């Protein structure tokens, strides 16, 4: 299990065990606002990275059986 998968599994378990719907919404709102702030500062750079990632995925799909 890679670190990302372990992290997702941990978060999933903790969400069900410890967060109320109100707490989950508060965290969702916080992360949404954080995402908007990050996008404002890094929009061009992130757009370039996303485009590169899409190109790589398309190339992999063309070469996979």
Image: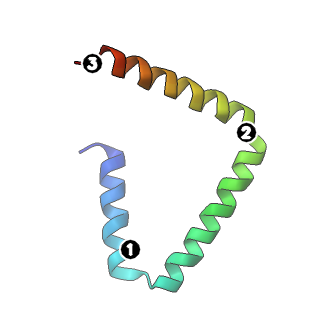
In the foreground, 64 or 53: 64
The answer to whether 30 is drawn above or below residue 50 in the figure is below
Q: Residues within 10 Å of mark 1 (few under 14, many from 20)?
A: some
**Number of the front mark, 3 or 1:** 3
Which percent across, then down, holds residue 8?
35, 57
Precedes in sequence: disc 3 or disc 2: 2
**Which numbered tag is attached to residue 25?**
none
Q: Quadrant of the rendered structure where residue 61 is? A: top left
Element type where label 2 sits in the image: helix
Tell me where residue 12 sits by quadrant: bottom left
Q: Disc 2 designates what residue?
A: 43
Name the residue located 63 percent from the left edge and 68 percent from the top edge.
30
> How far is mark 1 from mark 2, CA to CA?
30 Å
Q: Answer few, some or many: residues within 10 Å of disc 3's Cα (few below 14, many 20 plus, some between 14 and 19).
A: few
Residue in the picture at 33% in, 77% down: 16
Q: Which residue is mark 1?
A: 15
**Residue 62: x, y in percent?**
35, 16
């Amino acid at each position: 299990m890679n670190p990302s998968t372990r992290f997702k599994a941990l978060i999933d378990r903790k969400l069900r065990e410890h967060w109320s719907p109100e707490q989950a919404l508060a965290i969702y709102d916080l992360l949404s606002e954080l995402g908007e702030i990050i996008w404002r500062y890094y929009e061009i750079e992130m757009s370039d990275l996303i485009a590169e990632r899409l190109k790589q995925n398309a190339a992999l799909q063309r070469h996979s059986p």
